Amino acid sequence: MVENLEEKELEYSEDDLKIINEGLVKIEFPEFDKVSSDAPVFYNPRMEFNRDTSILAIQAFQKILNHNVDICDVFGGSGIRGVRYKKEIDNIGDVSVNDISSLANEFTKINADLNNVDINIYQKEASVMLRNHRGEFDIIDIDPFGTPSYFVDSAGYSIKRNSLLCLTATDTSALCGTYKEPCIRKYNAKPFKSEYCHENGIRILAGFAALTLAKYKKYITVLMSHSSEHYMRMYLYIKKGSRATDESLKNIGYMAHCKNCLHHEPIYGLASNIPENCPICGGKLTIAGPMWLGEIQNKEFIQEMISISDDKELNTKDDVLKLLNTCYSEAETPVGFYDIHVICRNLKVSAPKLDKILDTLKNNGYIAVRTHFSPLGIRTDASIEDIKNIILELLKE
Ligand SMILES: C[S@@+](CC[C@H](N)C(=O)[O-])C[C@H]1O[C@@H](n2cnc3c(N)ncnc32)[C@H](O)[C@@H]1O
Ligand SMILES: [Zn+2]
């Protein structure tokens, strides 16, 4: 069932109108009491970071395609994304902005005129928009309130080979497992509320997209993904081919976690044999998934985003670069991470400095990097036993 279908009566006066600057554009919008799904046209300053990151990702993708790219923002709101994409991305082709609300579209028109750009404006339910315009866009941006799950099938039907699917989810409580049932309903996956639940959430969303697109013989490569504040966002390179899709689905699997000793391990395959007990301590394993166990960061793509940032005016550039640098170092590392405080609680000791643990792991020949998912997280190929031993040794010093 698709929510927010009915247009709500919203009134505003001239006094409610506000203009803000973001990136290279000015955006006018009526200020309602609160930012919510009741107010289709609004400006959410907390999403500027998301939009700035999108500018870099879409520009980097345009460079991969190396021709003018046509883009559709399926949930336009005030039109801010469409207007920014048209104004700030080089070699952009047609920009289409869709919103089910006529008020939203009124403001998209106002904002396109205010910034002297041409935008095609549509007023359709998102899935209808996608299905009516099959194969037309090089880039599809799905940025709804809450879950994108209702729209992924239509995106899978509509999206053409060699294109980019940008997905936002704000229902992080479902994806992270605060509430289990909504995740099962919306993403057909069992979540697990753990110290690395945001990574599991990203992987569940990517896995859901991969499995949904597979029936159209389309497969994903995750170019970049992040969990920030109250939302998750990912950039998926979509390609087509039945063999390659079959191969790609080998990245679907489960995460097994031992609450007793904190060991975790990925288990590849949809119908694989899942062990019941922890190979380290014999404790019962908790299973989350199905989820995407393939890469969730792509080094070359992120490097391109970082280079492109030199030429872009972005208010949140420092924060975006911080994120991109961490995501860059997270690429090609093992699935899942360890939280140092959780391990130290398990050991009943106080925590040594995170940098010390990272250095010692690296000196012992392990991969050891930070993760953007958590300031206390370490991504490493060391086993939980090795990490615990290193912590205990450090505490003796
Ligand atoms: C989160 S806002 C979009 C924000 C915008 N992308 C931005 O960056 O500011 C969601 C928008 O989706 C619209 N919407 C909600 N359900 C929809 C549906 N099923 N089809 C099309 N538009 C929908 C709402 O009217 C609202 O304007
Ligand atoms: Zn165990």
Image (cartoon, rainbow, N blue to C red):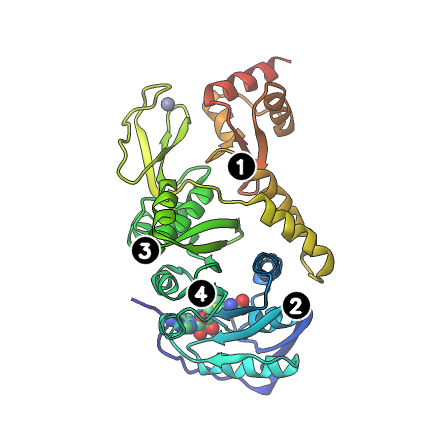
Q: Nearer the viewer, mark 2 or mark 3?
A: 2
Q: Is residue 9 above or below residue 220?
A: below
Task: Give yes or no for contact between labels 2 and 4 (Cβ–Cβ under 8 Å).
Answer: no
| Distance in Å between CA atoms under marks 2 and 4 | 22 Å
Front position in the image: 85 or 62? 62
Return the mark for residue 332. 1
Q: Amino acid at mark 3?
A: Lys
Under mark 1, the amino acid is Glu
Q: Is residue 41 visible?
A: no
The residue identified by callout 3 is 186
- The dot on residue 144 is 4
Image quadrant in which the N terminus is located: bottom left
- Residue type of the residue flagged with mark 4: Pro
Mark 3 or mark 1: whose residue is earlier in sequence: 3
Residue 9 falls in image quadrant = bottom left
Label 3 to label 4, Cα distance in Å? 14 Å
